[in-house]
Amino acid sequence: MPEEVLNRAKCRSTSKFYDFGRFRVDAAKRVLLRDGEPVLLPPKAFETLLRLLQEAGQVVTKPELMAAVWPDTFVEENNLNQCVSILRRALGDSPDGTPRVETIPRRGYRFVGPVIERDREGDGPGSGAPPAGTGPPQPERRSASRGRPRRVFALALLVAVLGPAVLLLRRSHAPPPIRSLAVLPFENLSGNAQEDYFAEGFTETLITNLARIQSLRVVSRTSVMHYKGSRATIPAIAHELGVDGVIEGTVLREGSRVRVTAQLVRVDSDSHLWADTYERETRDVLELQNEVARSIVREVRAKLTPQEHQVLNRARQVDPESYELYLKGRYFWNKRTQQTIPKAIEYFQRAVDKDPGYAAAYSGLADCYSSSGFSYDLASLAPIEAFTKAKAAAATALQIEDGLPDVHNSLGFIKLTHDWDFAGAEAEFKRALELDAKLANTHHWYAHYLIAIGRKDEALAESKRALELDPLSLILNTHLGWHYVMAHDYDNATAQLLKTLDLDSSYGLAHWYLGLAYEQKLMYPEAIAQLKRADGLLGRHLAVEGDLAHAYAVSNNEAEARKVLDDLSRLSRQRYVSPFEIALIHFGLGRKDEGFDWLDRAYRERADLLVYLKDDPRLDPVHTDPRFRDLLRRVGLPQ
């Protein structure tokens, strides 16, 4: 930075005021006002604004800004970019629609628009005083202060008499407390995209901590992740998600230190209610996450139960390497593909090997193994192997910490699909909802349970509740369509799945279930086309191919059905193929005896889809067969 620029900046009076539009900056108090009300800014964002105002209309280069805002400290350019982003959200655009802070490509930034620089606070809009340098001479300060003692006494008396009334008036006009929040993905300021998992993990944990507050509605992770890197405005995002407030922030990890900046925006007034910066050692990152959550809860005036107070004030230190492995596991788990789940298992396992007392990592293992054994998800292991490992991981997690709702949810799913312990499954789901009634995935899997035992209206209500909590989740949107299929409501199933594909036309699971719905509507060409599309998108999914063969069979294309059947039979000698799918193909071909033989094999292997025997419409033609009723009895389903 040139010496003359530094000297010019130092010579600027810190007692000055800068007025532009509805805003005023008080340089001495370090505060930004809009219509007289404070607009909270992080300290570095305020310093950036002040520097731009001091050179209003002139280009301030990035090196100049960084030297002024972070003197004697080396920072990445992303830090400056984040400050400018915060300022643009706080200031909005000029009346003509142009941004107040203009980017000058490859150079820096410029503040655009008229700025009035003043030496006295009384000057400016609404003050009744003319701009500096105009109007009659001002009286000397000592003459203006001669009556000060008398005025101070009168003011004190007025406050004593009217103070309570004024306080009540202010309270009556106070904005309502924020009751719903979206935590946008925290930005990774490292400049290295491979560090995204750290920022995403921080975001997910903050969402989890806030979601446990019963007086708050917090949008789930999968919905907010749609806005990662989005250029949508805060009001637009809030409108889409239906929330009162939005949290956004940044994460920067440098060596063993973590620095987090967070801010809260009230949507109805588009005002910044709060902003702060935190810095901790990595081993204290769990306490850091709780501290940020506590600050947000305080600012939105959320009511806490004693148990919620305890949760937000309880955090253990974590081994930094184990925490890093856990975050990588969650990162790959959240991608939820057959390729990423094995990577997630590897990282979670390494995390518990490093720290055997890390309950959250065991919870991650339980989730991964449960998905690996579920045919309509990411089946890659035989159910007995997958669910046995999932159950062991969940049990270990609960031994360490019983109050983890995700683990009780996983146990409920295991008891449903593997143990066929229906009463135990419901107890686990209810325990999970008792701990966190806003866990979307619990409502989702509880809906699976209700479908299995025939409580279809309740199942659809739970599935819709899950979607209210996580409206942009593709898997929840898709499974609502599947629940409609299981409820034999094919028109609503088709409508819901087409709506899901409007969100993402390349989502294979939605094409799969749409194929199932079309088949029940006797739209066989459309069903086959959707199932083929799903198989291509999912990278050859054997359960999809089994359903495709069934569609071929019921549409009188026996040759294609037998071709797929032979292929699956050959593959079953190399990897796991669900006998349930083989049974469906035989039933579609009209081979009842072979179909029941394969269902018996599915029973011996505890195939997960057997719990939906009563509901799968493809088995409707054999419901009256005594062998079917006997199988219901053996699985434990109501007759």
Image: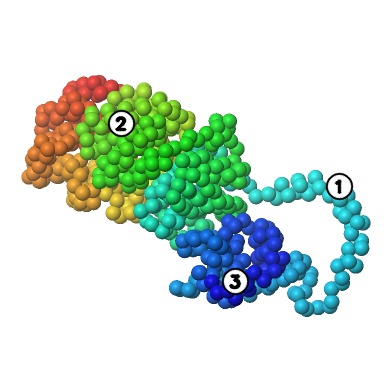
Q: Tag 1's secondary structure? A: helix
Instruction: Specify the label residue 70 is tagged with.
Output: none
Q: Nearer the viewer, residue 152 or 253?
A: 253
The answer to whether 546 is drawn above or below residue 275 in the figure is: above
Please indicate whether residue 21 sits to the left or right of residue 141 in the image: left
Question: Picture coordinates of residue 129 (x, y %)?
Answer: 79, 71
Instruction: Name which residue type carries label 3.
Output: Leu
Tell us which disc is closer to us: 2 or 1: 2
Q: Which mark is residue 6?
A: 3
Q: Residue at x 50, y 69 (%)?
A: 62
- The residue beneath circle 1 is 161
Q: CA distance from mark 3 to mark 1?
A: 51 Å
Q: Earlier in the sequence, mark 3 or mark 1?
A: 3
Return the residue at label 2: 390
3D distance between C-alphas at marks 3 and 2: 62 Å
The answer to which image quadrant residue 342 occupies is top left
